[in-house]
Image (tube, helix red, strand yellow):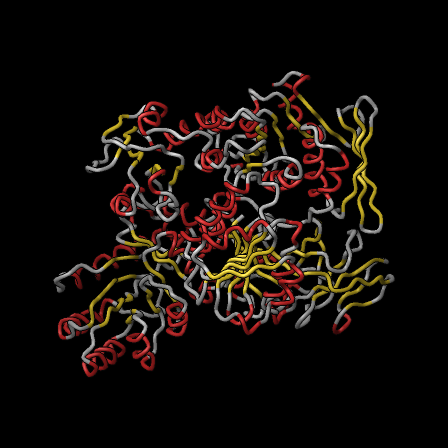
Amino acid sequence: MVQALTALQIAHIVEGKLQGDHPGLISRVSIDSRQILQPEATIFVALRGAKADGATFIPQLLKEGIACFLIHEDQPIVDGAAFIKVPDTKIALQKLAAFQRKQFEKPVIGITGSNGKTIVKEWLGQLLSQQYSVAKSPKSYNSQVGVPLSVFEIQSYHQVAILEVGVSKKGEMAALETIAKPNLGIFTNIGSAHDSGFSSTLEKIEEKAQLFRNSDLIIYCKDLKEVAQVLERQFPDEKLISWSDQAGADFTRSIKTQNGVSKIFLMKSDLSTYTFQTGLSDNASLENLTNTIIASLTLGVDAHKIQEGISNLRQVDMRLTLKPGINESLLIDDTYNNDLAGLRVALDFMRQQRPKNRKILILSDFKQQGQPKKIYPEVSRLINSHEIDLVIAVGEEIQAIEEIIDADFSTFKSTSELNQSLKAEDFASDLILITGAREYGFEKVVNHLQQRIHGTTLEINLNALTHNFNFYKRKLKTDTKVMVMVKAFAYGGGATEIANHIQQMGADYLAVAYTDEGVALRKQGIRLPIMVLNPMAESFQLCKTFDLEPVVFSLEFFEQLAQWTSSESHSMKIHLDLDTGMHRLGFEKVHLLDLIPLIKRNPQLEIASIYTHLVGADEEIHSSFSIQQLALFSEMSQAILQNLSYKPILHALNSAGIVAFPEHQLDMVRLGIGLYGVEVTGKYTSELQSISTLKTTISQIKSLEEGETVGYSRKGVMAKPGKIGTLAIGYADGYDRRFSNGKGFVLIHGQKAPVIGNVCMDMVMVDISDIDAKPGDEAIIYGPEISLKELADQIGTIPYELLTNISTRVKRVYYLD
């Protein structure tokens, strides 16, 4: 915070009622009970959300020393602390942030748009930090809560602040503009994100443009016609700084690319010119870089300094990434980041991972952050609060933390010296966070410690997973439990990491197909109750040892399990599968006469839940049959409940059922394919986010003449002279052979490249005749830009099959964007 405040001052700012007393000054704001560094100087804001009510953590936080709380007016208080009561804690948080923003009198840059916001923010931060102390939004903290939290990261010693601001529906920007109040605005590209929250693209642009209503200057690309239309209508010319690839803008841009180097020429309207060069070549990166350069020039950064900064930029996803490391270790790659706000986010992400042997932090000096005497004690507090076991530091200034951290410590003067010292045998099942200033090139450390697997990767967006979970959670009653299906390697996404993430999100149950899947989750520290859908008699001991709950689906299986548990003098939770129409597994109505006496004779088998599976919830044509199933399930389950002295959980709805039959939620729902971004009813397709991107690289490019053939059996024939690219993926990786001969396509630089010839075991060839590509370039197999449903329809299958077919040899990478 820029200015420390008393509890009474905060109450006045947020227009709340203060009850109790806090003797000191508040200089920190927290909304997360796990992120408390200085409890005596912290106010905890109890937000209410889809996952939890922050007020439930107040008793725990009182024990930890928090003595000031911002709560809803209907919450009770306790003695010994200050409580500020308000009608809405989120609005109060925003008011407090707006006050803090007013105390910062130096330049604030606000960035909005649909695409490129985070990249422009990060790149601009890197360029400006060469001569200024810069505060910027951590990661993608651009929401109604994220923007206030970003403002609280601004300190009095910062010389410039960069805030990323986003909205998802009409009416949200007014509150954020009051908080951010940018002096300089940047409007990036506009895309389809959050289209469902607006009636048109123009309405979305108009909403976002409200961020700049009090700005002095606004940077935008005049070639984005709709963006230009809105800005030029709403703001006077003297506030607008436009750039274009055509004449007539404040900056006219031209680009020449040769031998992997792009030269950017910018001519101002007064005919002064600037030239910059970069290794970036794709249109999106060059557009983002142009916004970054013009903003830097506008803020008075020397062109030579800008070029120096550009030389250190790289085309990288600005995100936290979880990667498999050597000797069963996990790496958190945060190598582009080097500020306190980002370190807090990265350490919190580290805390949320499954338990490992040691927690290791590799970090560099904090370059251009200003006032080392304030920075490094804060770094030390973060390290100590997150219980890091080993800190490996690179640089000179960072050595200042050695005497004030609780962790083991080693230091190196350079990254090369560090890399030479790293030995595989020094790491075993560790959790390693790698974060540092760009100039240290810590990606070399990541490469050194990364597990060597297949070059093709399946990237899992954990933010999208959270979004989808909360989408379904909002459709449920507050007391409806959620069971998440992580069978089949979590629909191909990797069961352990996804199970860990949804455990953090507040799921109530997990379901796996086979006992060994549940055992693997338990061995990796997953604590949630786990239902096993297809247990075998041979696995009873494993269910006991690892606290797994088998589904019982037949009289014979019930008797087997009952006999085993009796002989072992062991009780076990079980789940009853009732067959109401699927006719796959489960008890039919006729079986109840024998089942109920079995249940009575075997109290050691505690029925945790009773469930059924809807056959056609995803298709409206089967609605009447689904209703019949639900009615039969109610009848059968009630017959069982009448003979029990306790109440098991009842559940019938899968992802499609949650959407189609919300009135039949019962006690719990089972969330499967919807969590992974596929809405099978088609009603809310635009509301879900694709969580996974399967990508590979071009191994080689060949030029072929008309009539030449490609691949096995000469199935691919060149219709005209052109080029093919060979990709490092085949049917052994899960890329279906039915995509052969033009049925499938990939995206390279945003352009479609159709498959030519047969898909091979480890490779596939695509036609890139009309694409400017080179070996090593990325090819997207599926992801947000390529619909899984579209691909599945092409070969007559369903998205489930494409997801679950991805081979385990394909490396899974998890990230927060």
Looking at the rendering, which quadrant does residue 570 occupy?
A: bottom left
Residue at 61% of width from left, 59% of height from top?
Answer: 412
In depth, the one of 382 and 505 nearer the eye is: 382
The furthest residue to the front? 403
In depth, the one of 22 and 433 nearer the eye is: 22
Placement of the N terminus among the 4 image quadrants: top left
In depth, the one of 225 and 559 nearer the eye is: 225
Q: Position of residue 339 (x, y in %)?
A: 55, 44
Question: Where 528 falls versus 76 (above or below)?
Answer: below
Is residue 148 found left or right of 245 in the rendered image? left
In depth, the one of 742 and 804 nearer the eye is: 804
Question: Where 54 falls versus 323 (above or below)?
Answer: above
Q: Position of residue 291 (x, y in %)?
A: 68, 34
Looking at the rendering, which quadrant does residue 119 occupy?
A: top right
Residue at 40% of width from left, 37% of height from top?
Answer: 28
Residue at 56% of width from left, 51% of height from top?
Answer: 398
Residue at 76% of width from left, 27% of height from top?
Answer: 251
Q: Position of residue 677 (x, y in %)?
A: 49, 52
Looking at the rendering, which quadrant does residue 588 occupy?
A: bottom left
Q: Is residue 168 visible?
A: no
